[in-house]
Image (cartoon, rainbow, N blue to C red):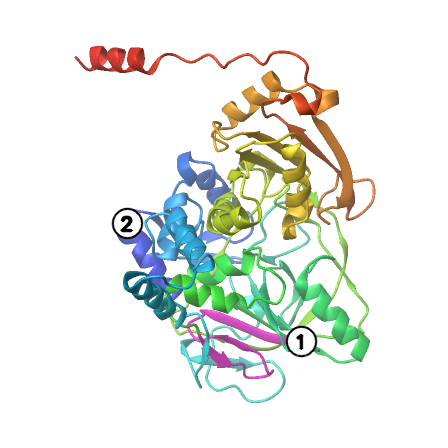
Amino acid sequence: MAFESFAQFVQTLEKAGEVKRIREPVATELEITELADREMKSPAGGKALLIEQPTVNGQISPFPLAINTLGSHRRMALSLGVDSVEEAGAQLGSLIQAKPPASFSQALKLLGTALDLRHAKPKQVNRGPCQEIIHRQDGLASAAPSPCPTLLSLPILKCWPLDAGRFITLPCVVTKDPDTGARNVGMYRMQVFDGQTTGMHWQLHKVGARHGKGYFQSGQKMPVSVFLGGDPVFTFCATAPLPDGLDEFVLAGYLRKKAVELVPCVTNDLQVPADADFVIEGYVDPRETLRTEGPFGDHTGYYSLADLYPAFHVTAITHRRNAIYPATIVGAPPMEDFYIGTASVKLFLPILKMNFPELVDLALPAEGVFHNLLFVSIKKTYPMQAFKIMHGLWGMGQMMFTKYIIVVDDDVDVHNTSQVLFRLCATTDPLRDALFTRGPADVLDHATTELAVGSKLGLDATRKLPGEGFKREWPPLIKMDAEIKARIDRLQKD
């Protein structure tokens, strides 16, 4: 389903018993982080929190703050309007695999798929709720009085004690390729430097950084717009590992089964969702001297150290009259980002299976802090197949950052870490079954000797075949007879 506002999504969560309202004032400086961290580490991700009176420097903000809204498997499914994320993945997989119809019934089914695709393409509208209040920062008159004259009026979090300042943690950053005009929506944290300037933490491998390089080469200022809130599917799509050049708003339209309505920004030529809660318009000047950004308590569980990044200059802030500020925190797992990352894997698994037919399932354990550790199960049919899948996955988009891949047989539940570790210890010889290689590394990985360059380890924990140099007999796994299990099941029931 499509949500017309972030508030509507929060109301849906509340009706489902997924929200805790915090009515007392809570400080955006560290206190909300501590509250949210305890909730995120509760069983199954706890509940979403709606902070009705967040305070900024002791003053109550005019905007409530919501956090942990996507921090459980159930809330992720609710955000996509499905009973489970696997359901959305199956729908996307069937769309990709669609073939010419061979019968009338197949033609009707394909027609239904085509009708779904009508909603994928975004459409432009002239105005939307995101511009009910407009406050320009470029010296021109604002369209209406605003309780949010600058960034300092927003309930932006200082998350952890050693953070360099306040950080916008759920920004959907809109940029476009200066050569092709192709749009991208990414998520890059933004440190607030002052009321009209932030850092723009797009890392070396990100699409935003590539767009910025194009503007640098042409000597032009780069238009950038940032939106927060609106339909939660926007946030999910901004983090999804889409191929470069595929518009995130197309995926959003397909998932929500309604075209994303986009409005022109007030001070630049970009477009943003009409139903967003906040829009921060501005530009990055690639010719400017880079500014020191960070430290920041990151998803690695450690602080990412200070480094040089571009500055983002605000030219306008627009918002809904009754906007809710969305936020998240990252840190030692488990956190909200674990559920977002798991949803991405489930959604795109059917597409990965098209490239790797032997693939059964994937899991990103919370302890791997998003992409450091990957469990893979395969239906093994020939020697060295586990190593083949390792190389293939390391070449797939953001999986290039995965440090450890463990491959197991198809009878292992990769979402059960205990099962995976049992097979790892029981079925591997370290010298024979380990594969070391080198490649790109996450810029935020403090353990690599060189920035953005590191090593990777793959471990083959599958049953070994003679063609892999295994000369001995492979023993069977201990299992009880199905008849005995059924008999004891009946006995215990009686």
Q: Amino acid at mark 2?
A: Ala
Please provide percent x and percent y for residue 144.
46, 84
Q: Verify whether residue 447 appears in magenta.
A: no
- Determine which quarter of the picture holds residue 426: top right
Observer able to see residue 223: yes
Residue at which label 2 appears: 16
Comparing 15 with 211, the one in front is 211
The residue lying toward the viewer, choosing from 433 and 232, is: 433
Residue 490: % across, % down: 21, 14
Find the residue positioned furthest to the bottom: 141
Q: Residue at x 39, y 73 (%)?
A: 118
- Judged from the image, the secondary structure of the residue bearing numbered disc 2 is loop
- Labels 1 and 2: the sequence-earlier one: 2
Given the image, on which type of amino acid does mark 1 rest? Answer: Tyr
Position of residue 312 measured from the top left corner of the image (x, y, whole percent): 68, 70
Q: Is residue 244 left or right of residue 63?
A: right
Which residue is identified by label 1? 283
**Numbered disc 1: secondary structure:** strand
**Count of picture labels:** 2
Where are the magenta residues, as a range? 261-282
